[in-house]
Amino acid sequence: MPIYEYRCERCGQENEFLIIGRKEKLRCKQCGSEDLTKLLSAHNTSNSSSRRSSEPGPGGCCGAPNSCGTPGSCCSG
């Protein structure tokens, strides 16, 4: 089931929505605004390699080389 993340442009709240043939407008769960921006989320995968799950893959944690830990990257907190 697809779960999508959106950020409210009014209050900054990040919201998750389960989308299944949804026809109604999405609204921020905090302030009710419809001014939402869809966020790009890294998907969760697993494989049978010997690498520990806490280690990023060879392309960086979000697939872009050398992206981990740089300001504005998907991995920085």
Image (cartoon, rainbow, N blue to C red):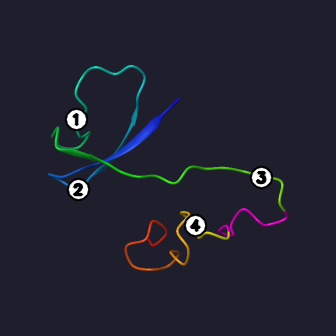
Element at badge 2?
Answer: loop
Q: Residues within 10 Å of mark 1 (few under 14, many from 20)?
A: some
Answer whether residue 52 is magenta in the image. Answer: yes
Element at badge 4?
Answer: loop
Element at badge 1?
Answer: loop
What residue is pinned by disc 4? 61
Residue 18 to residue 56: above or below: above
Element at badge 3?
Answer: loop
What residue is pinned by disc 1? 27
Observer-side mark, 4 or 1, equals 4
What residue is pinned by disc 2? 12
Mark 2 belongs to which amino acid? Gly
> Residue 17, image x and y in percent?
38, 35
Which is more N-terminal, label 2 or label 4? 2
Residue at the image position 43 percent from the left and 22 percent from the top: 20
The residues colored magenta run 50-57
> Residue 52, image x and y in percent?
77, 66
What residue is pinned by disc 3? 47
Separation (CA) of disc 4 from disc 1:
30 Å
Residue at the image position 46 percent from the left and 52 percent from the top: 41
Mark 4 belongs to which amino acid? Cys
Quadrant (top left, top right, bottom left, bottom right) of the C terminus: bottom left
